[in-house]
Image (tube, rainbow, N blue to C red):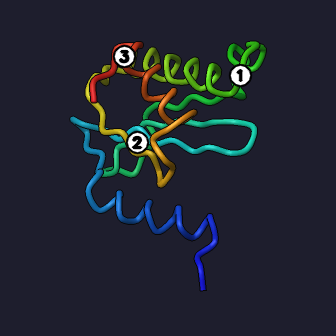
Amino acid sequence: MALSKKDRRLRIKRRIRKVVVGTSAHPRLTVFRSNNEIYAQIINDETATTLVSASSIQKDIKGAKGTKVEIATLVGKAIAEKALKAGIENIAFDRNGYLYHGRVKAIADGAREGGLKF
């Protein structure tokens, strides 16, 4: 029996998370993608805390016009700006089981443009 789309993504996510771990020196940037919105968090897995977060439902991004990919780029830039204010420069990117394509890639590119290194 074939796996459902969600089960397949979760299986890939578990495989990725064996390798990608966020530490205090090198936190993890994780992405969640819904049909309409996109969310990003920078997480320290040692203390299980979210250090910085950004999403497409924030007031400054919500009013922006454009495609979902363009809005994802804005979210990437927003999280990079917040991370640099918090003193975070180096991160590990966690695509959360999604393909590195489209909106997920746009967040990564926006974060790189904003000054994060990964």
Query: Which mark is in front, 2 or 1?
Result: 1
Query: In this rendering, would 82 be left or right of 39?
Result: left
Query: Residue 93 placed where, x, y %?
Result: 36, 39
Query: Residue 19 placed where, x, y %?
Result: 26, 56
Q: Quadrant where the N terminus lies?
A: bottom right
Name the residue beneath numbered marker 3: 84
Marks 3 and 2 in Cβ contact (< 8 Å): no
Instruction: Name the residue: 62% across, 19% down.
Output: 70
> Does residue 18 lie above or below 60 as drawn?
below
Query: In this rendering, would 95 be left or right of 18?
Result: right
Kind of residue at badge 2: Ile
Instruction: Name the residue: 21% across, 35% down.
Output: 25
Q: Which mark is residue 18?
A: none
Kind of residue at badge 3: Leu
Secondary structure type for disc 2: strand
Name the residue beneath numbered marker 2: 43
